[in-house]
Amino acid sequence: MKYIKQHIIWALLRISLGLIFLWAFFDKMFGLGFDTAPDKSWLLGTSPTAGFLKFATHGPFASFFQSLAGNVVVDWLFMLGLLGLGIALLLGIGMRIATYSGTLLLFLMWLAALPPEHNPIIDEHIIYILLLLGIYSAKAGQWLGSGKWWSKTALVRKYPFLE
């Protein structure tokens, strides 16, 4: 029973983190008025990364990240990353790719604002990285998701990195 409870908790954490990434994607895409004003949506032509990269970056790597602000390739990679991570985590599929790509995205965001505002080392980006690693290690995609089915497909058996 305890074993099942742990799997359910990891699955709920996976789903919750997936919803965080999906919400960020939809808010930036449509300007839902939370972090992104309606007149600043990506659909209306505003860069989804420019605000963060221009104004929230600081520390030793700030000039590098500021130079990326408004770059269309960076915008597309960021938005596809948010969408892909959100879907993968929500459904419990592609957990290996989601873990590695999500870790990279979050690490770069952490690096862009180094040192963090409220702690010299740890902020939510590091916590989310640890959470992604835990979700992957616990095989949380197989509980309350499509991970079991996904891992048995011919595509994943042929290309195991898609698991």
Image (tube, rainbow, N blue to C red):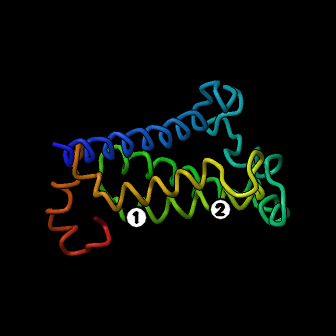
- Give the residue at mark 2: 108
Q: Residue at x 47, y 40 (%)?
A: 22
Dividing the picture into quarters, in which one does residue 138 lie? bottom left
**Dot 2 crowding, Cα within 10 Å, few <14, some 14–19, many 20+:** some
| Residue 79 placement, left or right of 36 | left
Dividing the picture into quarters, in which one does residue 40 lie? top right
Tell which residue pokes out farthest to the front in this image.
Answer: 2
| Residue 64 placement, left or right of 97 | right
**Dot 2: element:** helix
| Residue 94 placement, left or right of 2 | right
- Give the residue at mark 1: 97
Q: Residue at x 15, y 42 (%)?
A: 1
Residue 161 in the image: x percent, y percent? 32, 72
Q: Determine whether 138 is above or below 100 in the image.
A: above
Question: Amino acid type of disc 1?
Answer: Ile
Q: Determine whether 109 is above or below 23 in the image.
A: below
**Dot 1: element:** helix
| Residue 94 placement, left or right of 40 | left
Residue 76 in the image: x percent, y percent? 59, 54
Q: Residue at x 24, y 45 (%)?
A: 145
Question: Amino acid type of disc 2?
Answer: Leu
Residue 91 in the image: x percent, y percent? 30, 46
Residue 128 in the image: x percent, y percent? 52, 51
Q: Residue at x 49, y 57 (%)?
A: 130
Quarter of the image that includes the C terminus:
bottom left
Mark 1 or mark 2, which is nearer the start of the sequence? 1
The CA span between labels 2 and 1 is 16 Å
